Each structure stands twice: as structure tokens, then as C-alpha cells.
Amino acid sequence: MQVPNSFKLALLKQMLLGFQLSAVSSNSMSFHERKNAIKLSADAAMVFARGSTRWTRGLVSSLSKNRNNDGLLRGILGKKYERLSLPCCNSWKIPRSRKILKRCLGLCSRRKKATGPQHDVESSRTLARRLAKKRIQVLKKLLPGGESMEGFSLLDQTLDYAVSLKAQVDIMRRLLKISKASNLNK
């Protein structure tokens, strides 16, 4: 999936603004502080460039938990900060009864015990279902705000997040090359 140049340009512009606001080039910062400032600037720039999606809201929510990040987030995101920090209308999990879930998945205890070749097919289906469920749980943990998503929206948002991360890495690599080239010319 190709990332539009307008997204990369907005990402670069906001990332550089974040570097200025956090004074990354300052000699008074420790290595750890500088690393955190760069990561925060890159994440906030990615949120700004991508706009309002479920994962961007989740990322803003997790970044704004630390009150030290508030000034930089407001500086990079501007007016978007207030809108992105509000919870999304679909971001809350729907409470479900275990009994209903078991019935939907066909795991009722009243099911007949299968034997023979049909049993192998059912056990492989159960195994496949468990594997898929575990992978979905891993995706939910990796994606900001993923705990509240289900099914296709989780996959869609994960794909969008991965593409945005790839663009972010691309921009950071280019900045590193430019920085190295400018240091060689000095």
C-alpha cells in the first residue's frame, strides 16, 4: 500500500515542529530524554498527519497520560488535540454474556460427543478458532486503542497503523541521512 506524498509532507513538517518545540538539539538533554522527545514528536506528528481514526485517538490517549507530554502534544496537534483526546463514540466494549458467547460459538455442553473423522474436523476447527483468537488478542495489544475494536475494523485500523508507521520510519531514515550528510560537510 502506497503512502501519499501529502501524508509524508505533513508528517515531516509536524515532526520538525516537534523537534523544535522539544529542543531536541539542546546539549542540556540526556540521551534518554532526547530519545523520548524524538519518539513523542514522531508519534504526535503521525497522529496529526493521519487525522482522526480510532488508533490515533488511542495513541493520543496513551501519550496524554503523562502530563509532561501535554505541552508538546498541544504544540504539534494544535486545535486537533482537544478533538482527538475525546473518547470515540464506538470506543467502548460492548458487554457480552459468556453464555451468549458460548452459544454463538457452538460450545454448549449439550453438544454430542463426536468420534471418528468428524471429530478430527471439529478439533481442527476448534484449534484454528483458538489460534485466530490468540492472534486477534495480540493485535489488540499492539494497536493503540485496539482493545475496543472487533473483527474487520481491527484489521482495517491495524493495516492503516502499519502503513503510517512505515511512512514514519521512512521519514526518520531520510532525516538521518540528511543529518549525516550535513555533518560531513562541516
Image (spheres, rainbow, N blue to C red):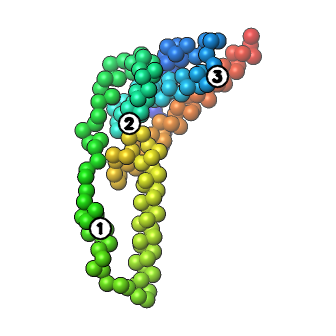
Residue 6 shows in the view: no
**Quadrant of the frame with the C terminus:** top right
Answer few, some or many: residues within 10 Å of disc 3's Cα (few below 14, many 20 plus, some between 14 and 19). few
Q: Toward which corner of the image does residue 32 lie, by quadrant?
A: top right
Q: Nearer the viewer, mark 2 or mark 1?
A: 1
Label 1 CA crowd tier, 10 Å (few <14, some 14–19, many 20+)? few
Q: Are marks 3 and 2 in contact (CB under 8 Å)?
A: no
- Residue drawn at 52 percent across, 34 percent down: 167
From the image, tell me which residue sits under label 3: 31
Q: Earlier in the sequence, mark 1 or mark 3?
A: 3
State the separation of the CA atoms marked 1 and 3. 51 Å
Would residue 4 appear left or right of 182 to someone viewing this image?
left
The answer to whether 98 appears left or right of 155 in the picture is left
The percent coordinates of residue 108 (x first, y second) are: 29, 74
Q: What residue would you read off at disc 1? A: 102
**Residue 34's quadrant in the figure?**
top right
Image: 97 above or below 165: below
Task: Residue 151: give x, y in percent of width and height.
Answer: 35, 54
Between discs 3 and 2, the one toward the N terminus: 3
Q: Residue at x 74, y 13 (%)?
A: 185
Q: Amino acid at mark 3?
A: Phe
Q: CA distance from mark 2 to mark 1?
A: 30 Å
Q: Is residue 128 above or below residue 74?
A: below
Q: Secondary structure at mark 2?
A: helix
